[in-house]
Image (tube, helix red, strand yellow):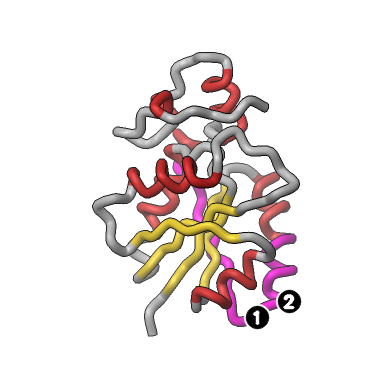
Amino acid sequence: MKRIAVFPGSFDPFTIGHEGIVRRALVLFDEIIIAVGANALKKSYYSLETRKEMISKVFRDDPEITVDHYEGLTVDYCRKRGAQYLLRGLRTAADFEFERAIAQVNRTIMPDVETVFLLTVPEHASVNSTIVRDIIRSGGDASIFVPAGLNIHDYKGEDL
C-alpha cells in the first residue's frame, strides 16, 4: 500500500522550516500532499492561488510531492485523498501541546489516520510564517527565511 501523508497548513508564506520538514519526510512516505487550508474566516496575506504557486515552484522537481488546497476538517481531506498519515512539524514545546490535542481529536474522528511529528532542525526553530510575513509586509529582506530560489518579492501580498 502506498504511504500517503498530508502536510496541512496555511503556509502564509511557506518557509524554510516547512520545506525542511517536507524534504526530511520524503524518506518516510511515498507521496506527500502539501495541503493549503482555505479558511474563509481568516484573512491571508497571500491569496490561496499564490501560496499554492509558491509551494509548487519549490517542489517542481519532486514528483512525489503535490500541492493542493482544502476547506473543512483536515481528516475529511485525508479520507478524500486516501492519506493514512498527517505530517506536522514541531518547533517548540508549545507547538507540541497544541498539536497533540489536535492529533488526539483527529484520531478520535478518524482512527485510520496517524499523525507523525517531526522536530524542526534547531536553526529553523525560530522561523515562523507570522514573523516572515511581518518582515515582508514591512519591506524587509525575508529571503533567508524562505526556500532557495523563491523570490518572495515576486508575489504580491494582500493588504491586511
Q: Residue at x 55, y 36 (%)?
A: 46
Q: Amino acid at mark 1?
A: Pro
Q: Where does label 2 land, which residue?
A: 108
Indicate the quadrant containing the C terminus: top left, top right, bottom left or bottom right: top right
What is the spatial separation of the Cα atoms under label 2 and label 1, in whole angstroms? 6 Å
Q: Residue at x 50, y 55 (%)?
A: 118
The disc label shown at residue 29, or none:
none
**Is 71 included in the stretch rendered in magenta?**
no
**Is 121 included in the stretch rendered in magenta?**
yes
Residue 98 spot, x, y in % from top left: 72, 52
Q: Which residues are magenta?
A: 101-122
Residue 35 spot, x, y in % from top left: 52, 57
Q: Amino acid at mark 2?
A: Thr
Horizontal arrangement in the rendering, residue 104 relative to residue 118 (left or right): right
Q: Where does label 1 land, which residue?
A: 111
Indicate the quadrant containing the N terminus: top left, top right, bottom left or bottom right: bottom left
Q: Residue at x 68, y 74 (%)?
A: 107
Q: Residue at x 52, y 61 (%)?
A: 87
Question: From this viewpoint, which residue is outermost toward the left?
Answer: 61
Question: From this viewpoint, which residue is outermost toward the top?
Answer: 139
> Is the residue under label 1 in contact with that under label 2 (CB below 8 Å)?
yes
Quarter of the image where one finds residue 114 = bottom right
